[in-house]
């Protein structure tokens, strides 16, 4: 892992970080569009005129899935960057802290009991947003609980933060298990595939809905990235420099809850993107959040697109849930990161 990061660091020193990451994302995107049970040539991907079966598959099936992977990857990576900046800890992650689990319980409740809430079915324009709204409520409640439990004498305690995250994950796991137990066969199938993370149901209307929800928040975060740098100095120093720390923390918590909630609603549980990507960006480009936040967005899109493509081609004609692939990548990375921090603290 260290050798890979060092080689990537040498490459980026000669070109702009954004140009380097956009080239990486572009290459992965073209590769993703060509791969699958039905092979498509690079020429068909780049062709812009005429009509063919290849283009029909690209436009109606693979391109919406590609854009969905990019949006979700961007969301999870930026959420991870925010959590790590907020708590000044590279191990902080929405998944580890239980925020995604809390959002998943809310969506699980919607899957199992949603048919009983008739008003959700009567408002036509609300239907594409119901899962997102439910996940947002779950993520907001969870994030608020964790944030309160992690405070020790007015300051955020990393130990309390992680312990609260462990407890919330355990409670949410039990709640999801109970929902699985009482669900019907159809609901059980939906819960199972959704809990493992899956982008297979991506459609253009989902992409437009997700983009409409995420774009304002991502723009807001890029604008606020300078204030994230102030938090790196410590809360007292940030207050001295004029930052309303508690208000700013509340804004970040709310935005993280909304980002995670929306991502979970559309893609299910996909872990470790928020942990891996910001850390890799800081290793390659430094700790300036004005660079970390936008670069995490691009690299997160590239990484999840790669994972989703591997999930599609690994067991053709079937496909793996993308959450399993990211866990296979993220688990060893987390252990490596943990050991690295332990050795660095000695």
Image: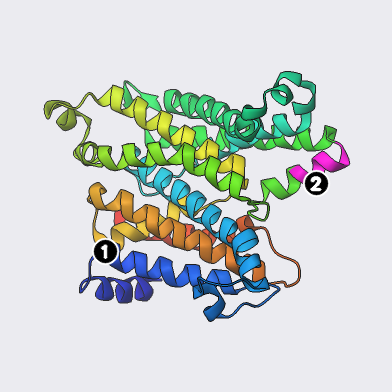
Where is the C terminus found, in terms of image quarters? bottom left
Q: How many marks?
A: 2
**Which residue is located at x 24 percent, y 48 percent?**
290
Q: Residue 49 carries which label?
A: none
**Towards the viewer: 253 or 66:** 66
In this rendering, position of residue 205 left or right of residue 94: right
**Towards the viewer: 161 or 69:** 69
In the rendered image, the vertical position of residue 233 relative to residue 342, given as above or below: above
In this rendering, position of residue 148 left or right of residue 248: right
User: Can you give x and y, in whole percent of width and height, for residue 64 in the image?
Assistant: 58, 56
**For the magenta stretch, what is the residue range?**
184-190
The residue indicated by pointer 2 is 189
Magenta highlight on residue 23: no
Q: Which of marks 1 and 2 is nearer the N terminus?
A: 1
The residue indicated by pointer 1 is 17
**Towards the viewer: 255 or 272:** 255
Q: Which element type, helix, strand or loop, lies under badge 2?
A: helix
**Which residue is located at x 42 percent, y 43 percent?**
79
Give the prevailing secondary structure in the magenta stretch. helix
The answer to which image quadrant residue 284 occupies is: bottom left
Q: Which element type, helix, strand or loop, lies under badge 1?
A: helix
Mark 1 neighbour class, 10 Å CA radius: few under 14, some 14 to 19, many 20 or more? some
> Marks 1 and 2, how far apart in space?
42 Å
User: Can you give x and y, in whole percent of width and height, for residue 250 in the image?
Assistant: 36, 25
In the rendered image, the vertical position of residue 30 relative to residue 262, given as above or below: below
**Which residue is located at x 57 percent, y 72 percent?**
50
User: Can you give x and y, in whole percent of width and height, for residue 269 in the image?
Assistant: 61, 46
The answer to which image quadrant residue 10 occupies is: bottom left
């Amino acid at each position: 892992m260290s050798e890979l990061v060092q080689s990537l660091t040498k490459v980026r020193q000669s070109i702009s970080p954004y140009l380097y990451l956009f080239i990486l994302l572009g290459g992965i995107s073209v590769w993703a569009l060509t791969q699958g049970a039905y092979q498509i040539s690079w020429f068909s991907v780049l062709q812009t005129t005429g009509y063919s079966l290849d283009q029909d598959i690209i436009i109606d099936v693979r391109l919406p899935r590609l854009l969905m992977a990019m949006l979700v990857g961007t969301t999870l990576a930026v959420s991870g960057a925010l959590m790590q900046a907020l708590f000044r800890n590279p191990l902080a992650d929405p998944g580890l802290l239980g925020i995604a689990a809390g959002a998943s319980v809310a969506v699980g409740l919607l899957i199992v009991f949603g048919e009983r809430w008739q008003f959700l079915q009567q408002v036509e324009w609300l239907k594409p947003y119901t899962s997102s709204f439910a996940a947002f409520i779950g993520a907001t409640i969870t994030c608020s609980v964790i944030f309160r439990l992690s405070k020790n004498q007015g300051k955020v305690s990393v130990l309390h933060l992680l312990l609260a995250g462990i407890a919330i994950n355990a409670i949410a796991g039990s709640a999801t298990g109970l929902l699985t137990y009482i669900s019907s066969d159809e609901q059980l199938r939906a819960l199972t595939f959704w809990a493992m993370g899956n982008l297979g149901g991506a459609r253009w209307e989902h992409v437009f809905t997700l983009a409409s929800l995420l774009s304002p928040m991502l723009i807001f975060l890029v604008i606020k990235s300078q204030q994230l740098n102030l938090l790196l100095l410590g809360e007292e120093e940030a207050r001295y420099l004029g930052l309303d720390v508690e208000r700013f923390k509340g804004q970040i918590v709310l935005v993280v809850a909304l980002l995670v909630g929306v991502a979970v609603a559309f893609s299910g549980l996909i872990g470790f993107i928020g942990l891996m990507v910001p850390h890799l960006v800081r290793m390659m480009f430094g700790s300036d959040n004005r660079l970390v936040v936008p670069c995490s967005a691009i690299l997160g899109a590239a990484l999840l697109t790669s994972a989703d493509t591997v999930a599609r081609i690994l067991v053709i004609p079937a496909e793996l849930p993308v959450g399993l692939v990211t866990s296979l990548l993220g688990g060893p990375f987390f252990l490596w990161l943990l050991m690295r921090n332990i050795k660095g603290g000695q």
